[in-house]
Image (spheres, grey):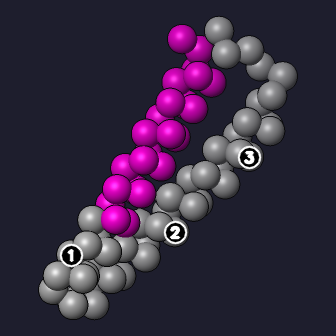
């Protein structure tokens, strides 16, 4: 596995983790109504969106490098 492929797997795993964190924060906010949980949910969503943008940038930058 190349460094490019490993990096992409790591980015996808991070996006999934941040999406799950955002959903968890939203669910907790609905249960408790605490503003901290809402902030965690929003920050998790922003982090996931940022990682998606970074992943697109990374793919565009290294499109000439093989996955092997």
Q: Which residues make up the magenta segment?
A: 1-23
Find the distance from the CA under tag 1 to the CA under tag 3: 33 Å
Relative to 14, does residue 23 appear above or below in the rendering?
below
Residue at image point 47% right, 67% down: 45
Mark 1 or mark 3, which is nearer to you?
Answer: 1
Nearer the N terminus, badge 1 or badge 2? 1
Q: Looking at the picture, how far across and down is residue 31, in whole percent?
A: 17, 82
- The residue where tag 2 is placed is 46
Q: Does the magenta stretch include residue 35?
A: no
Label 1: how many Cα within 10 Å (few below 14, some 14–19, many 20+): some
Mark sitting on residue 28 = 1
Locate residue 37 relative to residue 10 in the image: left or right.
Answer: left
Check if mark 1's residue and mark 3's residue have beta carbons within 8 Å: no
Q: Looking at the picture, how far across and down is residue 3, in whole percent?
A: 58, 21
- The residue where tag 3 is placed is 57
Q: Looking at the picture, how far across and down is residue 8, in whole percent?
A: 57, 32
Locate residue 67 relative to residue 37 in the image: left or right.
Answer: right
The main secondary structure of the magenta stretch is helix
Q: Dividing the picture into quarters, in which one does residue 53 lie?
A: bottom right
Find the distance from the CA under tag 1 to the CA under tag 2: 18 Å
Residue at image point 28% right, 90% down: 35
Q: Does the magenta stretch include residue 3?
A: yes
Nearer the N terminus, badge 1 or badge 3? 1
For mark 2, give the secondary structure: helix
Find the distance from the CA under tag 3 to the CA under tag 2: 16 Å
């Amino acid at each position: 596995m190349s460094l490019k492929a490993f990096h992409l797997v790591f980015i996808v795993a991070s996006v999934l983790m941040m999406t799950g964190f955002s959903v968890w924060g939203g669910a907790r906010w609905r249960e408790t109504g605490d503003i901290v949980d809402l902030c965690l949910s929003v920050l998790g969503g922003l982090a996931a969106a940022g990682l998606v943008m970074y992943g697109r940038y990374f793919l565009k930058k290294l499109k000439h490098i093989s996955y092997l």
